[in-house]
Image: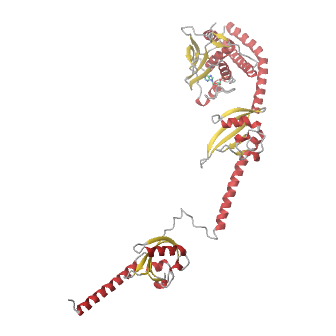
């Protein structure tokens, strides 16, 4: 049985333990980095730790004591709800995000953790309350609201960039307005983004009226209809378009801006004037050619006789040179006349079955007889072993084709080179038609790569050709192509500079062979 002294001693120990425990608890909360406070049943702070004092910017540690809890939070109602919920859940700590106001008036977002305090009889006595600051979002994610003095500055910046944008737009509009070609910019919804003065004038439209309008809805402007069709046809890129009595070359390009917007740029280049100039040129050429053809033929004929009769080598050489020049000039004149006939449409086609071997042989014979008069490359015609079927052709026109190709081969090949003509049995073209293929190969100067896509154009001559041969018009191949295509045939070539060139012609076989 415990004596009275023993009992007193044990109580004293317990008291000291309890005291130590309180001290320990006080120390623990005091050094706890988390701001915490003890609140009584009337919701008044009775004690707080150092972290809490720092967080609320108290000048003294115990400054908070006696402060009504509601006074340090912005959201009264939310706080009350949190405390009530904590009272009703005695064994748990509850959390809520609230805004705390420090003594200096600064508002801090915090997560508030609350648990209700009870005495040994389970009587409710108040709360333990801790606050955890909510980290501020990174500056890049959320810019701080502009301070009152910053606000006019931001507004100024905005105005500045707006006027810069407007200025840029005005500048681009001025640039496209000053262009001699018509320019139309269509956005990816098919609306008119911009139109320059020239395009508006060409299409008889009011610039301001159609800005922002859907191009497809503008079909009540009759003049615009053919262009709308071209714009709608995404495959068309460069084509000619007739608007009234004017002709335009229409170029349509798609462009995508940095921000992913796609625009279609429509450029209208008026070629009516070019056509007029070309017409004038051809009229002049036609008149001039007609005037000089007859005297030139007479000179050529006289020189031919002279070359054959002269025995003295020196004299023969001079006459040969004269003959060659006259022959070249006559060829040029003939070519120009051919072009004139072709352009004027005066010269219709009359088709019949034509024996190509015969036609080529005739011209090769003619060339070979020249061989005796002038120095030129050797000409070989590899006659096909089997008789080839006849082609459906205009005999005179086809003669022009072979003459142009063979003459070019001779003209652009040195006299120690060679020209070879072959004609092969029908090959089947892409459409399943039987064709005759004729090729004219030479070992001459070749066609430079940069010139290859232009040599069938009217008046075009490659640089290496003009350097070698001053005579030439650049219309021979243009005429040749027109004729071949009028025969439903095709023409193409393969060429290596300084190695030689081969022109190929394919012509359809005539249905009837007599
Ligand atoms: P040209 O009167 O100049 O011969 P063409 O229309 O007949 O005019 O030919 C156009 C251009 O094609 C020539 O100027 C030349 O540059 C090139 N060309 C044609 N045939 C040949 C060839 N066999 N070898 C090299 N270049 C050729």
Residue 64 position (above or below residue 162) = below
Q: Position of residue 513 (x, y in %)?
A: 62, 8
- State the image quarter where residue 505 is shown: top right
Is residue 462 found left or right of 39 in the rendered image? right
Q: Quadrant of the N terminus?
A: bottom left
Q: Residue at x 59, y 47 (%)?
A: 260
Where does the image place residue 304, in percent across and percent down from the top left? Answer: 70, 10
In the rendered image, is residue 437 in sight? no
Q: Position of residue 301 (x, y in %)?
A: 72, 10
Outermost residue toward the left? 1
- Which residue appears at 44% of the width and 79% of the height? 127
Nearer to us in this view, 85 or 141: 85
When the figure is inspected, residue 376 is found, relative to residue 50, above or below; the finding is above
The image shows residue 168 at horizontal and vertical percentages of 68, 52
Q: Quadrant of the C terminus?
A: top right
Reply above or below: 245 against 376: below
Ligand 1: image quarter: top right
Question: Residue 29's image quarter?
Answer: bottom left
Coloring basis for residues: secondary structure
Q: Residue at x 66, y 34 (%)?
A: 238
Foreground of the two, 490 or 412:
490
Q: Quadrant of residue 50?
A: bottom left
């Amino acid at each position: 049985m415990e004596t009275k002294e023993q009992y007193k001693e044990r109580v004293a120990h317990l008291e000291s333990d309890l005291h130590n425990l309180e001290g320990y608890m006080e120390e623990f909360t005091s050094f706890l980095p988390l701001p915490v406070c003890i609140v009584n049943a009337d919701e008044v702070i009775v004690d707080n730790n150092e972290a809490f004092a720092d967080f609320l910017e108290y000048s003294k540690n115990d400054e908070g004591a006696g402060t009504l809890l509601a006074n340090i939070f912005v959201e009264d109602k939310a706080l009350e709800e949190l405390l009530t919920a904590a009272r009703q859940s005695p064994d748990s700590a509850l959390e809520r995000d609230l805004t705390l106001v420090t003594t200096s008036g600064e508002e801090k977002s915090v997560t508030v953790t609350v648990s209700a305090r009870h005495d040994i009889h389970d009587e409710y006595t108040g709360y333990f309350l801790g606050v955890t600051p909510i980290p501020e979002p990174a500056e890049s994610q959320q810019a701080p609201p502009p301070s009152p003095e910053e606000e006019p500055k931001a507004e100024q910046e905005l105005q500045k960039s707006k006027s810069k944008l407007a200025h840029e737009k005005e500048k681009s509009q001025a640039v496209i307005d000053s262009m001699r070609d018509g320019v139309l910019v269509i956005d990816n919804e098919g609306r008119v983004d911009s139109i320059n003065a020239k395009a508006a004038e060409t299409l008889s439209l009011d610039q301001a009226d159609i800005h922002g309008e859907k191009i497809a809805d503008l079909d009540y402007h009759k003049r615009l209809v053919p262009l709308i069709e071209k714009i709608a046809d995404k495959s068309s890129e460069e084509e000619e378009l007739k608007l009234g009595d004017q002709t335009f070359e229409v170029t349509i390009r798609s462009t995508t801006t940095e921000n992913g917007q796609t625009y279609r740029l429509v450029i209208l280049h008026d070629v009516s004037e070019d056509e007029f100039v070309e017409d004038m040129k051809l009229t002049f050429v036609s008149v001039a050619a007609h005037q000089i053809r007859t005297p030139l033929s007479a000179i050529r004929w006289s020189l031919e006789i002279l070359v054959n009769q002269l025995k003295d080598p020196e004299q023969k050489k001079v006459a040969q040179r004269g003959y060659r020049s006259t022959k070249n000039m006559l060829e040029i004149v003939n070519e120009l006349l051919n072009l004139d006939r072709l352009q004027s449409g005066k010269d219709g086609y009359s088709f019949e079955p034509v024996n190509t071997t015969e036609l080529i042989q005739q011209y090769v014979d003619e060339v070979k007889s020249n061989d005796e008069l002038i120095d030129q490359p050797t000409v070989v015609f590899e006659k096909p072993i089997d008789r080839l079927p006849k082609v459906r052709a205009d005999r005179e026109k086809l003669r022009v084709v072979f003459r142009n190709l063979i003459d070019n081969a001779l003209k652009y090949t040195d006299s120690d080179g060679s020209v070879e003509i072959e004609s092969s049995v029908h090959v089947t073209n892409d459409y399943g038609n039987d064709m005759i293929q004729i090729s004219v190969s030479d070992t001459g100067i070749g066609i430079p790569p940069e010139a290859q896509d232009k040599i069938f154009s009217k008046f075009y001559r490659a640089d290496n050709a003009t350097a070698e041969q001053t005579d030439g018009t650049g219309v021979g191949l243009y005429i040749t192509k027109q004729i071949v295509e009028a025969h439903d045939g095709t023409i193409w070539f393969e060429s290596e500079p300084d190695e030689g060139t081969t022109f190929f012609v394919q012509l359809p076989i005539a249905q009837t062979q007599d």
